[in-house]
Amino acid sequence: MSDEVGEIEWGEGDPRVLLVMNVVLSSVFATVVVFGLSYADLAAFTLVNVASAALVLVALTYLVTN
């Protein structure tokens, strides 16, 4: 019986799927953050603010993970 039975090999994954997941999750998080800031009257809830925050988050997560 092999010692490798039941072990899981972790792969890198498809980079396209990871990029799409990064964009979607960063966009959702940016929307929540900008909505919270607008609720506290610290920033306007606009598409430009959400897109800017999402772009910054995508870039940060890309840099941290690579």
Image: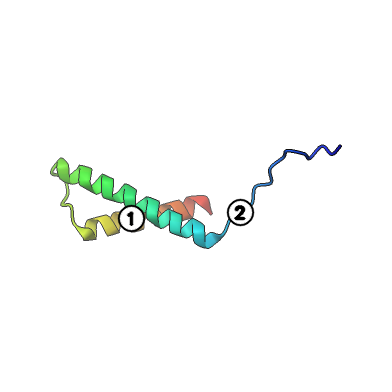
Distance of label 2 from label 1 (alpha carbons): 24 Å
Q: Nearer the viewer, mark 2 or mark 1?
A: 2
Query: How many numbered dots are placed on residues in this image?
Result: 2
User: Looking at numbered disc 1 in the image, what kind of residue is underneath it?
Assistant: Ala
Residue situated furthest left in the rendering: 41
Q: Position of residue 25 (x, y in %)?
A: 39, 50
Residue situated furthest bottom in the rendering: 16
Q: Position of residue 7 (x, y in %)?
A: 72, 40
Q: Residues within 10 Å of mark 1 (few under 14, many from 20)?
A: many
Q: Relative to residue 3, is residue 25 drawn left or right? A: left
- Report which residue position mark 2 lands on: 12
Q: Residue at x 23, y 48 (%)?
A: 34
- Report which residue position mark 1 lands on: 54
Which quadrant would the N terminus be assigned to in this image?
top right
User: Which of these two is toward me, 22 or 3?
Assistant: 3
Q: Position of residue 19 (x, y in %)?
A: 47, 59
Q: Secondary structure at mark 2?
A: loop
Q: Residues within 10 Å of mark 2 (few under 14, many from 20)?
A: few
- Mark earlier in primary sequence (2, 1): 2
Q: Relative to residue 49, is residue 17 drawn left or right? A: right
Scheme by which the image is coloured: rainbow
Q: Residue at x 53, y 54 (%)?
A: 66
Q: Position of residue 27 (x, y in %)?
A: 33, 54
Against 42, residue 48 (above or below) is: below
User: Looking at numbered disc 2 in the image, what kind of residue is underneath it?
Assistant: Glu
Q: Secondary structure at mark 1?
A: helix
Q: Quadrant of residue 14?
A: bottom right
Against 61, residue 36 (above or below) is: above
Q: Relative to residue 35, is residue 4 drawn left or right? A: right
Q: Which mark is residue 43?
A: none
